[in-house]
Image (spheres, rainbow, N blue to C red):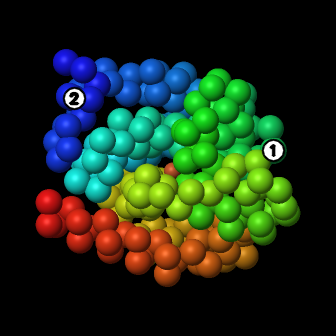
Amino acid sequence: MSVAAAFRYGESMVSADAPAWARTMAEAHMSPLGRRWTHVQQVARRAEELGAVVGDDLPVLVEAAYLHDIGYAPALAKTGFHPLDGARYLRRRGHERLARLVAHHTGARVEAQLRGFDDYLDEFPYQDSPLDRALTYCDLTTGPSGQPMTVRQRVDEICERYGPDHTVSRACRACLADFERDGAEIERRLANA
Ligand SMILES: [Fe+2]
């Protein structure tokens, strides 16, 4: 079965091996990280359900889901800002499209601004594409141990875990309205599929 056939529009399941390289890459870096690896695998499973939202780009979404937190891997964590470290790693490996998705998952552009990465958008232009929004939705509806959550619950969880003044919390709160608007649109499309 070809990759395209395996990921036909609307299918709820994908072939086990289509995003295998991304899973393998993610597992190599993240399996020692315990529950973060559990979270990543559940984000990828959530992504597999979004064929009705992203159509033929579903394989890219699943790959990005596996790789979105790879910048947390100690071997790759150079700046300490995981979307940037992950995106730079993927760019070095030649995965430009995935690098841009990873660089901008879950409001990272806002957190980059708060952290003083002034050239962030020059280094990784933001597309604000359906794939960007779908990846963020998958991340925000999957808890830190892989449990399903609403977008609001997830942002509350992040703010509680990091503390209200942390840059992660401030960025998530700043993006909450966009997160909820985009999440509602994705869920509307899923319901109508
Ligand atoms: Fe995540």
Image point (72%, 69%), residue name = 166
Instruction: Using the image as rendered, state which of residue 146 and residue 131 is in the foreground.
Output: 131
What percent of the width, then of the height, locates residue 167? 72, 68
- Viewport quadrant of the N terminus: top left
110 to 63, vertically: above or below: below
What percent of the width, then of the height, locates residue 38? 42, 40
Q: Alpha-carbon neighbours of circle 1 within 10 Å: few (<14), some, or many (≥20)?
A: few
Q: Amino acid at mark 1?
A: Thr
Using the image, tell me which numbered label, if any, was put on residue 79: 1
Mark with earlier residue (2, 1) = 2
Q: In the figure, is residue 165 to the left or right of 40?
A: right
Of all residues, the one furthest to the bottom in this rendering is: 177
132 to 20, vertically: above or below: below
* Of marks 2 and 1, the one in the foreground: 2
Q: Which residue is mark 2?
A: 6
Label 2 and label 1: CA atoms lie apart by 37 Å
Instruction: Using the image as rendered, state which of residue 33 and residue 71 is in the foreground.
Output: 71
Image point (48%, 58%), residue name = 129
Q: In the figure, is residue 166 to the left or right of 30?
A: right
